[in-house]
Amino acid sequence: MTRMQIIAKAVLTVLGVYALVLLYRVYPGRYTYRPDETPLFQEVALLCAFTVLVGLVAYFMVFSNSQLASKLAGPGEPLDTAKKSAWLVESLRVGLVFTGLMLLPGSAPTLVKIAKTFFLIRPVFNEIIISKSIPNMLRLSYAQWYTSIYHLLEAVLTIYLICGAPHFVRWQAKHSGQETASAPTIERPENE
């Protein structure tokens, strides 16, 4: 891979992660109708179509983007294995930290709510024990539960990305290393 192909691979990964977060933000599931009016078949069909769309975006932009990056960047001077690995790791880290910073303004209110939750644990348990029922603050509709879980996962992902996504970067470096290991190497002349 060339430097431009590595940078294109990092950019595609960053755009793929950002697209996945935005796709889940606009998931139209329980928002189209009230929960009691939504036909079950329509809900299942919409969920299946949405899952296929998310799977395609994840596959082609995040996990298997080497061919697309090669087509976007074009030919160039290939790097040796050590430089290629260093370029890939650094470009992915910079891109993923940048993605985390782009997601931070949307996750900031959730992070503040998470910090406030620690002060609400005791009153919630007291209300559960005294009234022997679920508190009103925990009675949410399906759409509210989906939104709450989405925002929680987005906040966790944002923190992970700002930390540089070390496990994902390591996996990508190993995955791209396997691609180069299966590629033909420089032929050595025989000394016979």
Image (cartoon, rainbow, N blue to C red):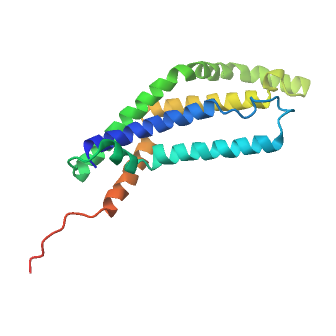
Spot occupied by residue 172 in the image (x, y as percentages of width and height):
41, 48
Residue for point 83% across, 24% down: 135
Q: Check the picture and name the quadrant holding the C terminus.
A: bottom left
How many numbered callouts? 0
Q: Foreground residue, 112 or 103? A: 103
Q: Is residue 67 left or right of residue 185?
A: right
Q: Is residue 163 left or right of residue 41?
A: left
Q: Residue furthest left?
A: 192
Q: Can see residue 13?
A: yes
Residue for point 39% across, 36% down: 11
Can you tell which quarter of the image residue 134 is in?
top right
Q: Eyeballing the image, is 172 above or below 129?
A: below
Q: Foreground residue, 99 or 23? A: 23
Q: Eyeballing the image, is 188 above or below 86?
A: below
Q: Can see residue 165?
A: no
Spot occupied by residue 94 in the image (x, y as percentages of width and height):
36, 32
Residue for point 66% across, 44% down: 49
Q: Foreground residue, 186 or 153? A: 186
Spot occupied by residue 179 in the image (x, y as percentages of width and height):
36, 57
Spot occupied by residue 74 in the image (x, y as percentages of width and height):
29, 45
Residue for point 71% across, 32% down: 146
